[in-house]
Image (cartoon, helix red, strand yellow):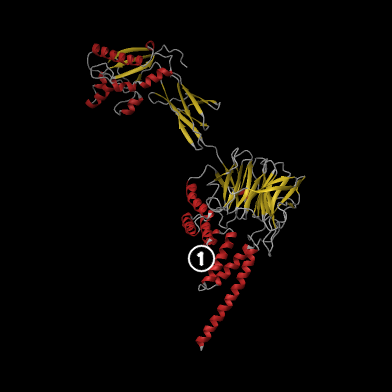
Amino acid sequence: MWGNFRYTFVLLIGILLFSCNEAKLSQARRQYLSGNYFAAAETYRKIYAETPREQRAMRGVIAYEMAENYRKLNMSARAATSYANAIRYNYPDTVMFLRYAQMLHKEGQYRQAEKAYLDFLRLDSTNILGLNGLSGVRQAVVWAQHPSRFVAKRADILNSNRSEFSPMLTSDGETLYLTSSRDEATGDALSNITGLKNNDIFVSTKNVKGEWQKPKLLDSPLNSVWDEGITSTTSDGSLLFYTFSPESDKRPASTAIYVSEKSGAEWSLGRPLRIVSKDSLSVFAHPAVSPKGDYLYFVSDMPGGYGDKDIWKAELIGRGVAKVVNLGPEINTPGDEMFPYILNDSTFYFSSDGHPGMGGLDIFEAVRHRGSEHWQIENMKSPINSHNDDFGITFAKGKNEGFFSSNRGDARGRDHVWSFVYPDANVRIEGLVADREQQLLPKAVVRVVGSDGSEREFITNKDGVYRFRAERGTRYTFMARADGFLNANKQIYTSSAEKDTTYFVDFELMPFNKPVILENIFYDFDKATLRPESKKGLDELIAILNEHPAIAIELSSHTDRKGSDEYNNQLSLRRAQSVVQYLISQGIDKHRLTAAGYGKSRPKTVTPSIAKKYDFLHEGDVLNEEFIEKLTPEQQQIADQINRRTEFKVSEQVVGLY
């Protein structure tokens, strides 16, 4: 008897709970359909927790509807969890798999999102959003690892602990409008959609130092207890277009575009801008005026589009509009395209979750080239875009910098204003000036002439170094000079690529009236004939003579300490003459060349470079016979080899040194 009673009691409780949950589910659906997502979320959460696990079908329904509601609330993490639950309970909806992938994508879980997209595409292989999502999630990994040159940072002075978004700079760049639900917003009631205060239009201006100040509520009757924001002004500052959206508990909010006129220093109460007559159900929002004031771009879900929300364009005539057209499938997708910003006649920016992106809304650049009717769409990549929502960009006039909005880095998913700038590529040229012994030359002069018309002179510092900032895609001609040395010339071209690059242009100046060793000059034993490999070593000398056609040089050859003076003098002279003959054969005027053979009469004085190479030698040591005989046999061989050399020096009869 007790068992029957208990069974009946449990059954009655189950029926009551089911009936109760049915009632609450109806309530949640009403809240959802009227756009009160914040209130609906709490209702869905409660009924899901109260529904027994055994009621799998009911839990699947609630999980799916709850996921959709979280998606509308921009709570992607909670939405992903709810979609996963709906999938687990076999909720019968194909699109659910796409939404699940999109939420993972938006959370930056790229590997899991890729798998989820592939699962969805097995069910619907031609779905554009699925294909673009898969493409985006794969590219996002690369974009995150290789960001663009843009630098983005949160604009703290413009933000609060609430939400602010869609910054908009005026044409003179002195005023910034933004949309915010911060505490100073009009009214006290919290929105059933967001759980925050309704948005108002705020304005920031610059101080005398050119710094942006904390935004203040726009002092105008256009701000109300309802939702206002997402502004755009005409270039002459006479009209302000904005989105207005009252709330309703009984039906979805009717969002429309309003326009306000400047009267003195104040904006007037806005009036609705009728875009399409007899259409009170469609959304009209996110106005953007073209710089010339001839077109108004906006967002709408009205019939005739390609997705949920599309970008449209209308001709502005007087205080009204005409010729409303959709921007077409190159711009619009089956997803959402929103927040247009018109830079000029051929370039505009918008946000989309339908084109391949990093997750959520990404900002895209659309360019139409002269004579073309087609738009070239490019994702702005990281750091402008992230796996969160990035939207509402605005540029300072004539500059590649401005502001945008994003909910990245906010645990509550609230939007904030970020600044961005595109720094010029840091192209630098630096070098050092030294002599042939690698001794650095301070106070040397480096003159630089650029193909861009620039002319500059630099003095090397105590380390013999000069450096300067250069331009991309420019030819630079250099001339280095220092007292007691021949001038040297060089030329380089900087790349036009937009990347930080440092070019090194070093100079090794040739002294005059001071001997310089010719490296890698070889003769057969006891002969004066140049070996073939020596001729390559003379190419540098030929280049110097060709670069300085007014100089004459003495070529001298030297031997080691072995043998008689007469023999060594003759051998060294013949060797020097062999070098002269070779230079003449290469087109050098014979009158510029003098051969001398000094045998062993001029032992080498150790230079800094030689001392650096051999630790048993010191700068200033003279490698004469007396010095060498004190060395070990191995060291003597090295010293003799150093003495066996061919040198040249610029003679005193230098003509036209420049």
Question: Does residue 511 show up?
Answer: no
Q: Which residue is drawn at 53% across and 64% down?
A: 93
At which x and y percent is residue 120? 49, 59
Task: Say which of 250 and 369 sits in front.
Answer: 369
Relative to 168, residue 197 above or below:
below
The answer to whether 217 appears left or right of 620 in the picture is: right
Residue found at the far bottom of this picture: 1
Residue 446 lies, with reference to residue 84, above or below; the image says above
- Total labels: the figure holds 1
Crowding at dot 1, Cα within 10 Å, few <14 / some 14-19 / many 20+, comes out as some
The extreme right residue here reads 264
Taking depth in this image into account, of 54 and 395 the one nearest to the observer is: 54
Residue name at image x 66 percent, y 58 percent: 197
At 60% across and 59% down in the image, what residue appears?
72
Q: Can residue 333 be seen in this view?
A: yes
Q: Where is residue 481 in the image (x, y as percent from the top left)?
A: 46, 21
Q: What residue type is labelled 1?
A: Asn
Q: Position of residue 163 (x, y in %)?
A: 62, 54
Circle 1 sits in a helix, a strand or a loop, which is it?
helix
Of 613 and 134, the residue lying toward us: 134
Q: In the image, is 606 to the left or to the right of 385?
A: left
Task: Decide: is 27 above or below 107.
Answer: below
Q: Is residue 267 above or below residue 7?
A: above
Percent x, y of residue 646: 31, 18
Q: Mark 1 points at which residue?
A: 85
Q: Residue drawn at (55%, 39%), measured in percent from left and top? A: 423
